[in-house]
Image: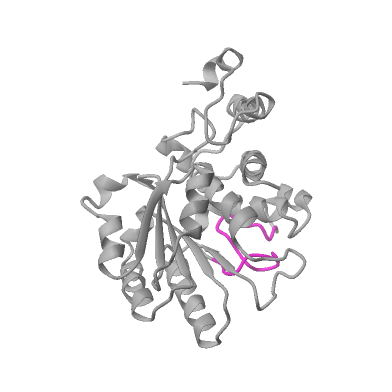
């Protein structure tokens, strides 16, 4: 499956999952869909039939509240039956709101306490180096998550140990739980912070699949890599985009119908996953 098709399918899956489970964090999940689609279709060396193969690349979602997007990506890639996604966020389900590895093939670590996944993934990269296993570790962290102190410790340590098998993707959607990142912790320069401690830093449009692929394939220059992905919270659903309310709200009723219809319109009209729906007459209230 190509990355654009995968991204489209995952967006529909995510909307259905959070609707059925009355779950929050749809905006956070949608902002990373294109990153995940490129990683899983074009970049990582993985085998859905052998999810614990020692010679696999590892992916960790440090902003664990966006787990719906990872679950959906794994299902679309064949790690488990897609029907299981119907239990997301429901009592007794293994598909918890914050991503969990328990009973779910393809999930490397349970995360949710912000900053922990970033530190754990750095440890994974170090372990692979010590074992002389030539595989890579990828982690997505939120820009708001970087407020956590242990993130700073990880930024320092990854270059110190020469972890050129380690790629950090910063989901820079510029919003966090309580507002705009610049208002919560002003003047945090992500690029310079990573670069000053020894990372190779590349900044891209986090919804441009070619730009993302080029960044993943760029030379590490013997150092850990940081890809700063400029994204939009709620990407793909016009009325959710850059709207903090969708950190918490679950699309129900008319909002759910509009979200699904908008995504289906894009598919019917041959739209890219990175551009807005062209059939505005069909959506009236859904299109801003």
Q: Is residue 68 magenta?
A: no
Q: Is residue 182 left or right of residue 12?
A: left
Number of numbered markers: 0
Q: Position of residue 39 (x, y in %)?
A: 57, 56
Q: Please, what is the dominant secondary structure of the magenta stretch?
A: loop
Lateral position of residue 24 relative to residue 73, left or right:
left
**Percent coordinates x, y for residue 93 in the rendering:** 70, 57
Which residue is painted at 69% across and 25% down in the image?
A: 268
The residue stretch that appears in magenta: 93-110
What colour scheme was applied to this rendering of the protein? Answer: one colour
Q: Residue at x 31, y 74 (%)?
A: 156
Residue 172 in view of the camera: no
- Residue 103 shown in magenta: yes
Q: Is residue 167 above or below residue 67?
A: below
Looking at the picture, does residue 18 appear above or below residue 158? above
Can residue 239 be spotted in the picture? yes
Q: Nearer the viewer, residue 205 or 177?
A: 205
Left/right placement of residue 131 relative to residue 244 reads: right
Residue 98, by quadrant, is bottom right
Q: Position of residue 270 (x, y in %)?
A: 65, 27
From this view, report whether residue 198 is shown above or below residue 20: below
Task: Name the residue furthest left.
Answer: 187
User: Residue 182 at x, y = what percent?
Assistant: 26, 46
């Amino acid at each position: 499956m190509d990355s654009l098709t995968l991204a489209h399918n995952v967006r529909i899956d995510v909307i259905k999952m959070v609707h059925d489970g009355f779950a929050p964090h749809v905006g956070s999940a949608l902002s990373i869909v294109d990153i995940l689609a490129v990683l899983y279709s074009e970049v990582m060396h993985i085998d859905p039939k052998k999810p614990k193969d020692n010679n696999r690349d590892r992916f960790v979602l440090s902003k664990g509240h966006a787990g719906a997007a990872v679950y959906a990506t794994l299902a679309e890639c064949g790690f488990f039956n897609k029907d299981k996604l119907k239990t997301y966020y429901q009592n007794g389900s293994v598909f918890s709101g914050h991503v969990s590895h328990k009973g779910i093939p393809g999930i490397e670590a349970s995360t949710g306490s912000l900053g922990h996944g970033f530190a754990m993934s750095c440890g994974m990269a170090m372990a692979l180096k010590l074992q002389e296993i030539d595989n890579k570790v990828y982690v997505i962290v939120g820009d708001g998550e970087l407020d956590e102190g242990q993130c700073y410790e990880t930024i320092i340590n990854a270059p110190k140990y020469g972890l050129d098998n380690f790629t950090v993707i910063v989901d820079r959607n510029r919003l966090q739980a309580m507002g705009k990142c610049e208002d919560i912790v002003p003047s945090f320069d992500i690029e310079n912070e990573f670069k000053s401690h020894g990372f190779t830093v590349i900044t891209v449009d986090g919804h441009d699949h070619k730009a993302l692929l080029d960044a993943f394939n760029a030379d590490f220059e013997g150092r850990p890599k940081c890809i700063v992905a400029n994204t939009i919270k709620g990407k793909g659903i016009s009325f959710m985009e850059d709207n903090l309310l969708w950190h918490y709200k679950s699309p129900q009723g008319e909002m759910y119908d509009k979200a699904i219809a908008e995504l289906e319109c894009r598919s019917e009209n041959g739209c890219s996953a990175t551009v807005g729906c062209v059939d505005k007459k069909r959506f009236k209230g859904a299109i801003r």
